[in-house]
Image: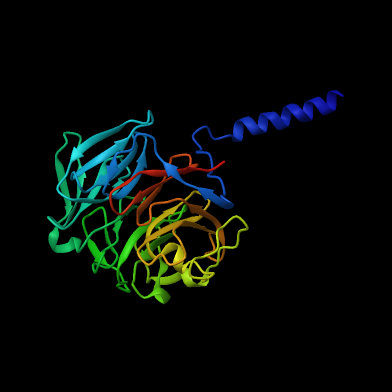
Amino acid sequence: MCYILRILILILFVDVITAQPNDKPRAPMPRGVYRAREVPDSPLLLASGMAWSDMGLIIAERKEKRLVVLRSSGKFETLRKMTQPFGVAFDPKGKVLVSEKIDVHHIVRIQDDDKLDVLVGAGEAGTPHALAVHKNGTIYWSGFPDGGTRSRTPDGKVTVHQPRIGHTFGIALSPKQDWLYVTSKLPDKDRRAVWRFPVAVDGTLGKGQPFFATKDLKPMFKDLPAPKDGDPSLVGWIGRVQGLAIDSNGYFYIGGAESHTSGAAVAVISPDGKEVAAMILDVPRNIASLALSGDGRTLYIAGAGEYRLHQVRFD
């Protein structure tokens, strides 16, 4: 009995010393069919990019030309007025980064004194849309409609990456930051895809390649309504691929706008890009962007038009 007790104590001791108190809980792995719902008290938002931080969910709101924050209390507040915000992200120090286009074309950082620090000017920004940030401070952005995929290193060097994929929209890094993914919102349904670029340790990118196309993926769930157009693939459910998010397990969340011939949904794709793990229904018909909460258990869905913010909570 004493021997068994010593073994149990040893096991408990090892568990304690190997535990990492700052480890974030891993995201769930959604399976099956889910239904989204409106976030309580959400205003109508002409939303674009979104990003999560300790202060809450930051939303680029184009109608009122501002950044909106959804606090953990459930309250929506104006964080700051902008010129024409599209993409939102955070740098390694927690500073808010914003891409703007139409009225201006640049990428800026909001300083502690609320002033804007222009990181990429009009000559190099292209048509900046969604943003992603490497842990070393390299900034990546998509270029809808024709700016290609670009990056800025911490020392200010801007690169247009090859190939120059048309209509890049959503953008996100893999959990290990060894791949950068972008969605291609091309009108041609056979070319709607998620592409990826290999990421070196220093944040530089290799040549991009298609990773998976919506025409090659078929959702197969008994609770999923039959596609309106009879096409079993994701082409008609997602439409032209726009929003993109990746959770800590490497699962892809993709949503689109326009050309919804089967219905409208957000699809959850396995990390290898070969399986539809889940479908999320009752979403805005035109999706602008997707963002996950810090614990990865809530997906926020913004519509490309005047929609209320939607969410789905995973068990």
- The location of residue 76, given as percent across then percent down, is 30, 34
Q: Is residue 82 visible?
A: yes
Query: Residue at 18% across / 43% down in the picture?
Result: 64
Q: Residue furthest front?
A: 228
- Camera-side residue: 49 or 124? 49
Using the rendered view, name the quadrant where residue 171 is placed.
Answer: bottom left
In the drawing, does residue 33 fall left or right of residue 284?
A: right
- The location of residue 123, given as percent across then percent down, is 13, 63
Q: Is residue 203 visible?
A: no
- Camera-side residue: 59 or 296? 59
Query: Residue at 53% across / 59% down in the picture?
Result: 271
- Camera-side residue: 135 or 220? 220
Query: Residue at 26% across / 42% down in the picture?
Result: 96
- Camera-side residue: 114 or 291? 291
**Where does the N terminus fall, quadrant-wise?**
top right
When the figure is inspected, residue 227 is found, relative to residue 44, above or below; the finding is: below
Using the rendered view, name the quadrant where residue 14 is placed.
Answer: top right
